[in-house]
């Protein structure tokens, strides 16, 4: 870092390389790739995690000890990018965000010093590192996380016919954000099989429950009662099998392979229930992309919030989104080189503006989002700029959506 400062060379940190906007790469500087610093070990119930660990390294390092930290579902996402920006996953409603379980981190700041950040030292950097987003305040070299004991978990999937989509969504949004903390539930709409006129999208809900299958079945009653589901699956898995189930990989070795895909994804937080008009807009959007054979595959992914996530005050950490009912991701994927056809994504996203909160998840970082400062950080932006001004006054760490030194 001192060498880079001396020669005015830009430095960009990289961990898992999953930044949606490619902000962990640069054509005009040096990438500091921490991915080989990936050791995971536990001491007195605290997980010491090298800043380069991928989530599968963390999960597979902790589960043999009967422990976990709440983190994301993609096994190759890096712990650094995930934790610094929040960290949402299937254990989140019970155990909180990844950043809520961060006890301390080691950070190399812009002046080339290695500092310990915790409630007791450099408390401002500790606060900013829990939701302020990667690449803003320094290069994290290691993290200390609170761990939690885990055993088997129950899981479910419900699939509905497309004709039931609105009914199923209304039931999900009334149920999932207010369910007991032990349950994390998603809702999912996607393009399906052969496309074109006359075909219909796919609609489902899935989730993980820290409890028994029997208790989960009874909890799911209001969801299953919506419309006429074509499939209801409930089962039990060991924790590591559940991780692989949600990741869609098996065995562990396969979870270490980084697939390269082309997609555009952006997000909204929803703080009040979506009206019938808003739901109609989402469903019409899915029908439009299903009917098209030229647009790439598309999905709308809804993750329930609430539970432990929302019990933290919005200003206690830099992660401000503590009042949301759920988030929406607008996902478009395509194959082959080139930018892809983003028409669907852009027009549905625009059509949803009247119905959403104006907030978005900083880890689903979106280079097209003009209002990103407010959307990612809301009332925490001012304090983040103060921390930036103090520790990186010349914006040595800089990218298109990095925290500014002034508002
Ligand atoms: C397929 C996929 C699935 C995902 N699933 C989830 C999910 O389930 N839950 C969730 O919350 N998010 C999820 N995300 C979003 C993910 O949290 C962010 O993309 C995250 O920023 C990725 O971190 P990374 O370390 O892999 O990426 P990188 O691209 O390496 O880094 C992301 C940002 O952090 C910075 N950074 C990297 N390393 C460091 C470091 N050591 N110190 C300081 N800054 C650093 C980079 O410069 C960059 O700005 C997913 C993303 C993808 C692509």
Image (tube, grey):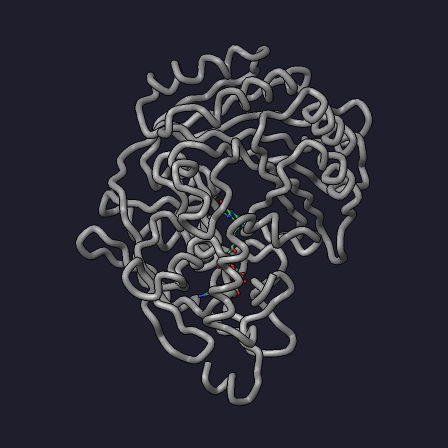
Residue extending farthest to the bottom is 7
| Rendered residue at 56%/53% (across/down) | 259
> Residue 75 location, x and y as percent?
45, 50
Judge left or right: residue 62 versus residue 391. Answer: left
Q: How many marks?
A: 0
Residue 76 in sight: no
Q: Is residue 15 above or below residue 60?
A: below
The foreground one among 269 and 210 is 269
> Residue 39 location, x and y as percent?
32, 63
| Rendered residue at 48%/34% (across/down) | 305
Q: Is residue 267 above or below residue 405?
A: above
The foreground one among 136 and 283 is 136
Judge left or right: residue 269 versus residue 87. Answer: right
> Residue 192 location, x and y as percent?
68, 31
Residue 339 in sight: yes
> Residue 102 location, x and y as percent?
34, 53
| Image quarter (top left, top right, bottom left or bottom right) of the C terminus | bottom right
Judge left or right: residue 124 versus residue 303. Answer: left
Which quadrant of the structure image shows residue 37? bottom left
The foreground one among 82 and 381 is 381
| Rendered residue at 53%/49% (across/down) | 379
| Rendered residue at 51%/89% (across/down) | 6
């Amino acid at each position: 870092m001192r060498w880079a400062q001396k020669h005015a060379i830009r430095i960009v940190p990289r961990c898992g390389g999953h930044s949606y906007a490619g902000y962990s790469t640069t054509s005009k500087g040096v990438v500091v790739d921490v991915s080989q610093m990936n050791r995971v070990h536990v001491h007195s119930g605290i997980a010491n995690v090298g800043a380069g660990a991928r989530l599968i390294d963390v999960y597979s390092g902790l589960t043999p000890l009967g422990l976990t930290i709440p983190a994301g579902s993609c096994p190759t996402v890096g712990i650094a990018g995930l934790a610094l920006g929040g960290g949402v996953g299937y254990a989140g409603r019970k155990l909180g965000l990844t950043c809520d379980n961060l006890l301390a981190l080691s950070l190399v700041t812009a002046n080339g010093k290695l500092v310990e950040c915790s409630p007791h030292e450099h408390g401002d950097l500790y606060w900013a590192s829990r939701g302020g987003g990667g690449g803003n305040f320094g290069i994290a070299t290691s993290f200390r996380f609170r761990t939690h004991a885990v055993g088997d978990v129950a899981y479910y999937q419900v699939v509905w016919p497309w004709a039931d989509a609105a009914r199923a969504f209304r039931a999900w949004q009334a149920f999932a954000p207010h369910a007991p903390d032990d349950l994390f539930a998603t809702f999912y709409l996607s393009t399906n099989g052969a496309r074109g006129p006359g075909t219909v999208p796919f609609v489902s809900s899935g989730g993980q429950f820290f409890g028994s299958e029997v208790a989960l079945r009874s909890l799911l009653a209001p969801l299953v009662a919506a419309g006429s589901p074509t499939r209801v699956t409930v089962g039990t898995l060991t924790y590591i099998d559940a991780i692989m189930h949600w990741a869609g990989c098996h065995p562990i070795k396969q979870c270490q392979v980084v697939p390269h895909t082309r997609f555009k994804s952006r997000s909204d937080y929803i703080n009040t229930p979506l009206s019938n008009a808003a739901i109609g807009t989402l469903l019409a959007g899915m029908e439009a992309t299903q009917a098209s054979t030229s647009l790439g595959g598309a999905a709308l992914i809804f993750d329930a919030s609430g539970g432990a996530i929302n019990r933290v005050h919005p200003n206690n950490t830099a992660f401000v989104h503590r009042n949301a009912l759920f988030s929406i991701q607008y996902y478009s994927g395509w194959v082959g080189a080139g930018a892809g056809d983003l028409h669907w994504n852009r027009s549905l996203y625009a059509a949803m503006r009247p119905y959403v909160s104006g907030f978005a998840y900083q880890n689903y970082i979106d280079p097209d989002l003009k209002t990103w400062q407010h959307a990612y950080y809301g009332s925490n932006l001012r304090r983040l700029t103060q921390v930036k001004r103090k520790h990186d006054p010349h914006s040595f760490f800089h990218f298109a959506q990095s925290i500014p030194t002034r508002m």
